[in-house]
Image (cartoon, rainbow, N blue to C red):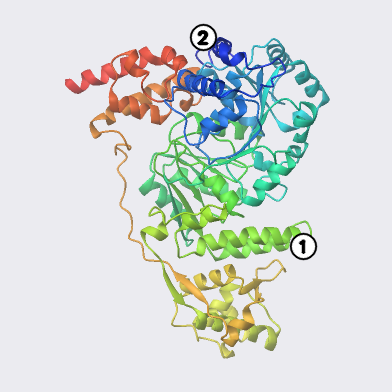
Amino acid sequence: MPADRCPQAPWSSRAVSAGLSRLTRMTVSSGVTAPPTQRAASESRQLALETLQRVWGYPAFRGEQADIVDRVVSGGDALVLMPTGGGKSICYQVPTLLRNGVGVVVSPLIALMQDQVDALAAHGVRAAFLNSTQSPADRAAVERDLLSGELDLLYLAPERLRSEQTRALLDRATIGLFAIDEAHCVAQWGHDFRPDYLELSVLHERWPTVPRIALTATATPQTHREIAERLGLVDAAHFVSDFDRPNIQYRIEPKTAPLQQVLKFIRTEHDGDAGIVYCLSRNSVERTAAQLREHGIEALPYHAGLDADVRARNQARFLREDGIVMVATIAFGMGIDKPDVRFVAHLDLPKSIEGYYQETGRAGRDGLPSTAWLAYGLNDVVQQRRMIDQSEGGPARRRQLSAHLDAMLALCETIECRRVQLLAYFGQQSEPCGNCDTCIAPPEAWDGTIPAQKLLSTIVRLDRERHQRFGAVHLIDILVGKRSPRVAELGHESLTTFGIGSDIAEQDWRAIVRQLLAQGLVGVSGDGYGTLTLAAGSAAVLSGTTTVRLRRDPVRAPKGARTRRTAPPDIPAEALDLFEALRAWRAETARAQSVPAYVVFSDATLRGIAATRPTSIEALQEISGIGAAKRDAYGEAVLAVVARESDAQVR
């Protein structure tokens, strides 16, 4: 790493570990610890807390972090399910500084390893990576540091561990722990399967005395079991944290004109904020990014079809600059540590709740209010059903995909709290949140049996009487009595159902069809044209033995334009100028060091500085997120910014 990439810490993190003599005596050269006494366990936890405070500047562990750290420091295996932004990395970073040997982190995020290493270097932690992007000379330098004990953490891609050369290298090193990040990638029917993860059982087989910690932010009870079984962690300590992200507001609205909808959403609610817009296709990514740029929004495209250099540049800009909107397919996002993403928008229906939760979880990692917004329409359902019918794999695979889609559709169509349903999918009970669209403006439930019968009757007549099948648009034209050229050409004005649904607007009919598809009462033909067919439950609806309950979305008042100069939470209005000055200083500093802005300081830390206006190094180090390395590297510069803005305010 170039010397100017990150500030050099005035102390060695390994020296901190070596200085913890009482804990070190618990550790044998192989990395296995003897069962700690109660006193030793207490001392171990205190040393872990001191390390957290000294290196990261956090006053205390959050949630189950302390228990997880205790488990791994003492040599035990752990499986950790913790939401994005919950602090998973601390659970292996602190133990590796307290154990004898290097922590080896298995991660699929090759494109982000440099940023992860830079972020650790800013805290004074000696980290490096080995992956395919490096030159032979760079790899040789990392290997020398590893074998000489000069590294605290080493990042490896899972495919690299399949190499006997890499395994032999690790045999020669002293390994303190293995951390398996993004562990859900081991689930073969999950949303982000990586075949190389299936080989990670080698960690326990080849290095049975080294503790392992597997971590993920996304796992249903089924995926949880699969991770434990495939990684040999059934007998490990399992830590399942609260999946709720209360700072994220979940909103789903009918899709009418998606490009205009997302533009309005960004301009009126998140103008100038960093965000991610997900689209299903590459063409949609390009088109949406171009339109946002035309309207003055700094938007960049990202998809697998772009040149690798373009993808890398766009990702770097998103991570390093403020206020960039990334328009992307799901090829972008896993492992993105940018804490100030204020919104995640979906212009197409995600394939599963796991994917939706993983993607929306990239918003608001810093705990500030953020939005998960989704535009969802009839064509989404038709398209997803058709993709499942045409997917590779046998019937079991298609049933699994259908089950994932059904759960996602149920979330979209619920009249209850979205957060309650979302968390229930991951096996967690909760109460209505008051911070989702169905809580803020509850939709109306109504009896849609008769409209459903009218639609199904039209499908029956076309199929039985004329041996014809059509998509939703043509069926709706018949129901509302619209004499379109095609209706006239095919003589469908003579159908007995022509015009029987004219009391319902076309847009409302689209919502009805969408919901019938979501409930499995209408099917989609596998002919590739999205034609609608009868489904298994259609007969019961037509006979009147099944009542169809539908939702009617409330009419929402348009939001007014947002003023960009609104003070963020936890900052008095009079501190806003200082906060913006600190952001400007941070941006300049990050550019000079070629690192993302959050590597210097997070927005949360800048908020703390702006709110308290510290005037001394001692006062500065009381703010969360300022450890020893950052205090010494940036303290004087930050105090100068505070003094300058305070003087300007007085004048």
Kind of residue indicated by mark 1: Pro
Depth check: 186 or 646 in front? 186
SS of the residue under disc 1: helix
User: Is 433 displayed left or right of 42 in the figure?
Assistant: left
Depth check: 274 or 446 in front? 446
Image x and y of residue 267, in percent: 38, 47
Image x and y of residue 335, in percent: 58, 36
Which residue is outermost to the front?
A: 38
Q: Which residue is mark 2?
A: 11
Q: Quadrant of the N terminus?
A: top right
User: Is 439 displayed left or right of 545 in the figure?
Assistant: left
Q: Quadrant of the C terminus?
A: top left
Residue 395, numbered label: 1
Image x and y of residue 196, in percent: 75, 37
SS of the residue under disc 2: loop
Q: Quadrant of residue 608?
A: top left
Name the residue: 63% across, 31% down: 111
Mark 2 neighbour class, 10 Å CA radius: few under 14, some 14 to 19, many 20 or more: few
Labels 2 and 1: the sequence-earlier one: 2
Q: Quadrant of residue 78?
A: top right
> Does residue 53 appear anywhere in the picture?
yes
